Image: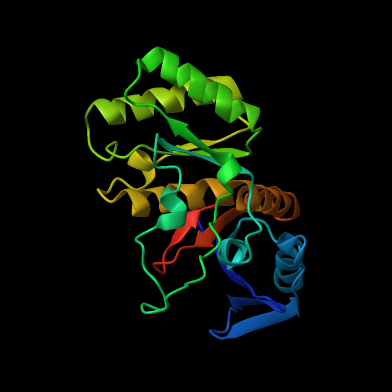
Amino acid sequence: MSRARRLGVDTGGTFTDAVIADEGGGWRVHKTPTTPREPGRAVLACARALLGDEPGVELVHGTTHATNALLTGRLGRAVFVTDVGFGDLLAIGRQERATLHALEPHAVRPPQPRARIVEHDTGAAAAESIAETVRLVAAKKPQAVALCLLRAWRPGPEQKREKALVKALRRALGREVPVFSGHEHAPEIREYERGATVWAHAALAPVVGPSLRRLAHALERAHPNSSLRVMRSDGGTAAAE
């Protein structure tokens, strides 16, 4: 069985560039203007230019879609859930200041609107507190939810509570609203690092997820039996899912 041809496509701010190995041991390349509103259109244009309608392609996609969304603040409507009294966790961070000796430093704009932060009372009875948190989250009509209870990074009562919250929120919000938890995605002791990671995951899911799904479906229609892989920050790749 022959190995699928691998096409590399990188989406940049101005141009989308593609490269594929040819049968003679060299390379074929193609460049086309990026389509910012729907990046997948330019990716597929590159695939058509270099492959025609060839099936069974492995498309390896490099993109700064997520990075750009974080930098510009064009994110999904995520709700962040943490302990009572820690609603400003993301805004305070590690209290680092760019100008250490400034007497009147300008506060950095919080990445998450305070109106979409819900504080969960871990000291109250589990059933009542979970039901109230689910009600408050649902009222904000989120596209995604991020959970970061302070001591849920390791097995124990608070991780058990976080797992129960995840289950209750998924049941109440349905499959269309993903729910992410810190103990699953960044199980480390520091709450800011864990919270920021799971928040970014939730805020980016409604932005990057639909775009990748549309690209994967369009790739399959244009090039049957093909697969889409995405470049990771460590230089490897991951399945689009």
Q: How is the image coloured?
A: rainbow
- In the rendering, at what x and y percent does residue 184 appear? 36, 40
- In the rendering, at what x and y percent does residue 14 appear? 72, 79
- In the rendering, at what x and y percent does residue 144 appear? 58, 39
Q: Could you say which is closer to the camera, residue 84 or residue 163? A: 84
Q: Could you say which is closer to the camera, residue 14 or residue 146? A: 146
Residue drawn at (32%, 48%), measured in percent from left and top?
Answer: 191
Residue drawn at (49%, 17%), measured in percent from left and top?
Answer: 131
Q: Residue furthest front?
A: 103
Left or right of 12? Residue 122 is left
In this view of the protein, can residue 241 be seen by the observer?
no
In this view of the protein, can residue 40 be seen by the observer?
yes
Residue drawn at (66%, 82%), measured in percent from left and top?
Answer: 29
Left or right of 77? Residue 125 is left
Left or right of 44? Residue 175 is left
Residue drawn at (64%, 82%), measured in percent from left and top?
Answer: 28
